[in-house]
Image (tube, rainbow, N blue to C red):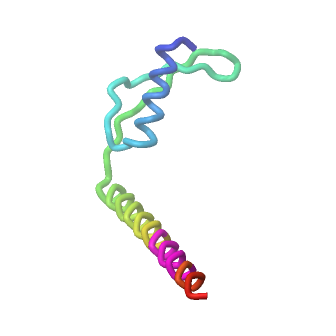
Amino acid sequence: MDKENIVRVGYVCFNWIYMSGEHISNNSVETQNYEGDLHSLKHQKKRVDINTLLNKVRENQKKEKLESTIFFSLVAAIIVVTGIIISI
């Protein structure tokens, strides 16, 4: 693969992982399979279901809430343990 194709594949992967709601400006990307044959990946336009997007947002909010709860619990535990050690 030449440098241009590597950049295209990287761009498509980045958009797919981090910005799946964004439209990709290049509709086809050529890649090589294990046998070395060149084939293209075509991205078809799909309709966006608002319920699916809302469910993803709610799921992300739940994850963030859980992460923040765990973080603050760990901070509180460290403060309690430090207080116990200092008082001894």
Q: Residue furthest bottom?
A: 88
Dividing the picture into quadrants, the one containing residue 86 is bottom right
Q: Residue furthest left?
A: 50
The quadrant the C terminus occupies is bottom right
Out of 9 and 78, give the one closest to the viewer: 78
| Count of all numbered marks drawn on residues in the image | 0
Residue occupying the point 48% across, 73% down: 75
x, y percent for residue 65: 40, 69
**Would you say 1 lies left or right of 68 here?**
right
Q: Magenta region, mostly helix, strand or loop?
A: helix
7, above or below 61, in the image: above
Segment colored magenta: 71-81
Dividing the picture into quadrants, the one containing residue 12 is top left
x, y percent for residue 26: 36, 23
The quadrant the N terminus occupies is top right
Out of 32 and 79, give the one closest to the viewer: 79
Out of 45 and 55, give the one closest to the viewer: 55
Residue occupying the point 69% across, 23% down: 34
11, above or below 37, in the image: below
Q: Residue furthest top?
A: 2
22, above or below 76, in the image: above
Q: Is residue 63 magenta?
A: no
Q: Is residue 78 magenta?
A: yes
42, above or below 37, in the image: below
x, y percent for residue 27: 38, 25
Residue occupying the point 58% across, 15% down: 38
Dividing the picture into quadrants, the one containing residue 36 is top right
